[in-house]
Image (cartoon, rainbow, N blue to C red):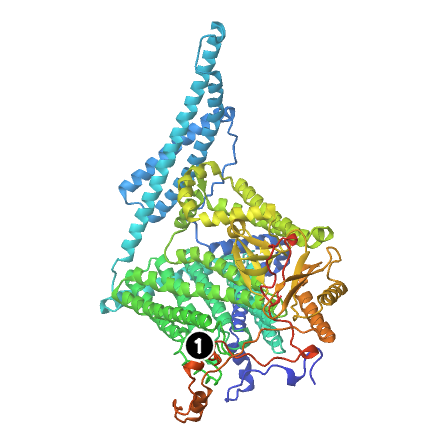
Amino acid sequence: MPRAGQPPRSLRPPRDAEPATAWPPRARAPRRLARAPWRLAAALLLALAVVLSGLGAGPGGGRALAQGSQAAGAAGEAAEAAGDAAQALVPESPSGPHFTPPRPPQAATPQAVEADQGSIDARLEAWADTAHDAESALADGSVSTAEFEAMRARLVRQRDEAASTAERLRAAHQPLAAQLEALGEGATEGGASPRAEAGLSELRHELQDRIDALESRAKRADLAYSRADSLVREIDELIRRRQVEEFLTLGPSPLAPTTWGPALSDTLGLLASLGQETLEVAQARVDRGSSRLLPTALILLAVSAALLLGASRAFTVIRRRLGFGATRGRRALAAALALCARLVAPTLAIVLLRGALAQAELLGPRAEVLADHLASGLVAVAIGFAIAGAWFSPRTPELRLSSLDDAAALRGFARSTLLALTFGLHVSLVEAGASLDLSPAALAVGNLAVMALGAAAMWRLADVLSPGPEAPAAAPAPASEDEEPGDPRPDEDPLAESLQSAATVGRRLERLGAFSLRAVAVVSVALAAAGYYAASQRLFFPAAATAAIVGAGLILFSLIREWVEAALENRTADSGGLRLLTVFFGFVIVIASLPVLALVWGARTADIGEAWRMASAGVEVGGTILTPMVFVTFGLVFAFGYALTRLLQGVMASSVLPNTRLDAGARSAITTGLGWTGITAAALVGIAAAGLDLSNIAIVFGALSVGIGFGLQAIASNFISGIILMIERPVKVGDWILVGGTHGVVKRVAVRATEIETFDKTALIVPNSELISGRVVNYTHNNAVGRLILKAPVAYGTDLKGVQKLLLDIARKDRRVLRYPAPMVLMTGFGQAAIELELRVILRDVNQIFDVQTDLFFEIDRRYREAGIEIPYSQNIVTLRDPERLAAAFRGAPPPTDQGLAVPDPSQAAETPPPAPAPSRRRAAPPPAPKGPAGPGIGAGIAPDIAPGAGGDADGGGGGDGGR
């Protein structure tokens, strides 16, 4: 029976298949430890804690155990010690351990600056001395790179302080210059009295002296700034030149037999010295007695073991929870938690372990250096293990973020972990040996060994990451008999081509990445074997770090995409805006990874800071400095104003304007005008908030505006026409207009063009300038009243008064026809076969013209049939000459000759009827329809018309499109 709180055994996720070999009962614990590396590490930490406690049990060990109760009260001291241990893993900044806090902002008034002139002069002298020392060091050239880095940091601070000082001095100069200008040039005719002029002259001299002093110090600050800036550039150039020289330096080849002996002896000597140093420190530790920090070390070890065991338990729980139908969002959350369990817990455990070793006081100075590198290497291995586990996840496919199968994921995880282990060995052994002054021969041999292992892992990893051969395209289904060659197939996806192109680009990038990894693996091993120690390291390990950074970025992007897709699973509306979040976060990830990649490939922190300083300084355009912060400020303010404008538009369109008596066109005009006003105001406020001076920029762009104006003349004309349409409103939303021979309803009046929906439900985009300068018929300009003209011809001999009464009765019975002006029946003329009559009515709503026309036609046809009124139509009679010849031609017999035909006598020509007319080119008309109710309808020659009172033409028609 399962325990309480557990699912039945049949519902639990199946465990991994056990190997065929039966494990003895006593071997189960080692087997479990071997399968769980975190448990094994925790067991080792506990064993180390036991060893440390045994060391503490020497002379004075009883006192150490007795002081265990006091360890709880020393929590603050333990935390401080752990922080010091963690700080030991962080490399020291190139600028030196001392940090000079920035000066607080000082007042720029003339009195404040003059009161501070002593400190300003002192700083100017100090800056000159620093610049002189830097120039001497550059001329000597024997200063180390680390000292040049520290000197560069001082020069950078000096440059920033000199710039701020010069700006402060000039700000103090402005009010004094304004006061001097207010005093004028001097004595003028009709001016002040001589005594007053003497006082003014003395005041002018005093102001001039103060101005000269400020200008002198400002010039010296400018000189200090320029001098520091040039020295910084010279130091950067010197450091880069040294890096290139180091990159191209040829050392001893590790393949030469003469290198192996010295390398082995130097390595053994270093290990022996480290062991001897450690034993001496441990013996001194035992002789001295228990340290009061030993309980702290034990506590740190215990916490490290607890972190590893907790991470293992958390990962087990996550795997178990995923076996019960987790949703997409839960799987993404579980993948993120698993990544944290793989990354955070081991890293913290390593840091605490390093702190425990530091508190135990068992290592000497050189062993401390080796321990620092070992801790850094273990952190690198933990990071690589976490990235590989999150991307490949060989044992938990539910958490896998890649699209590989189980076998490929297992291979990729194993090779990525091996590559991370190689990176850790490089940091822990090779770099530690370089820090401990190991000989170049030993470093070359160790570098080749580590790099050969890493190159093999990188080559095999490229095999996993490289895409396989492309699958052949599926043959299209056979076309049916009704399909034409150019017709779109019903099962054809219109986005298939674009998706296939994106997939092709992705495969090409994968091939490029795999090729790059293979090339780096081969070239780096070749350089290491040839003796180019620095070149091989600068190529291989940055490439491995780049792979880790790209993997971390892909993991983060995949998690964000999964969360977004999980949030969109239950959404039915258009969610294109939310899907753009993945694109935005992808862009942010790429931008954030660029400085990290630059640092990995050899850029210095100073180079990144210098690039940021130059970008922050901006570019001067027409006296206005454009910086990234200017664009960010403008973008934020404009985005806020734009969102506020859209909110106000929505409130006006949905809550305020519908409660008014305005028509749809007026409401649309108000909403659109509010949008234009709000966007313009948001742009102006953004420009003001960013501090842009448009007057200077206008001067720069004044000449460009002339050329741009010619190119954008049509756009400007349409924009002005749109403003005129919004103000005069000759055409508004909802109007039925006729433009360019096309009828339609205005749907939207935009800045450049107006959207018209035709009666065929198609969108017609008309530039605004055509609506202003062209001829437009607006059927609903002032009101919806319009005229309809129906043609209803009758046969000759019909009672016209009766027909008139009948038509008027039909019109009056329709409620959509106005009683005033009253309907009328007009006789327009005598046709060839009928008397032409027209029924003219005024409609309440011209938008219903086709419905009214159809209903009235049906009613006229019905009433005509009931009254026996004939609706005539034209008929054509075709007379054939020589019908015998035509009949013979149809039968296939030879045509008859003149023999046997009656030839008229010319003397009897007056009594002979005239010959039949020539055959007509018109088609033979159908036989005449019966009269009365069985006669035809009245569709021929009937069309509506709209009166000028409705805004249309005097004789224009409204029936251009019958689909309305």
Disc 1, SS: loop
In this rendered view, identify the residue nearer to me: 373 or 289.
Answer: 373
Asked whether residue 729 appears in the rendered view, the answer is yes
Left of 597 or right of it: where is 305? right
Q: Quadrant of the C terminus?
A: bottom right
Residue that protrudes farthest toward the front in the picture:
907
Q: Quadrant of the N terminus?
A: bottom right
Q: Position of residue 413 (x, y in %)?
A: 46, 74
Left of 210 or right of it: where is 434? left
- Residue type pointed to by label 1: Gly
Q: Position of residue 891 (x, y in %)?
A: 44, 93
| Count of numbered tags | 1
In this rendered view, identify the residue nearer to me: 123 or 215.
Answer: 215
Image: 133 above or below 530: above
Query: Looking at the image, which residue is at 65% across and 74% down?
Result: 937
Image: 368 above or below 872: above
Q: Position of residue 507 (x, y in %)?
A: 41, 72
Residue that protrudes farthest toward the top in the picture:
194
In this rendered view, identify the residue nearer to me: 731 or 218.
Answer: 731
Asked whether residue 264 appears in the rendered view, the answer is no
In this rendered view, identify the residue nearer to me: 511 or 532.
Answer: 511
Q: Within the image, what quadrant is residue 939 found in?
A: bottom right
Q: Position of residue 932 (x, y in %)?
A: 69, 77
Q: Which residue position holds label 1?
A: 486
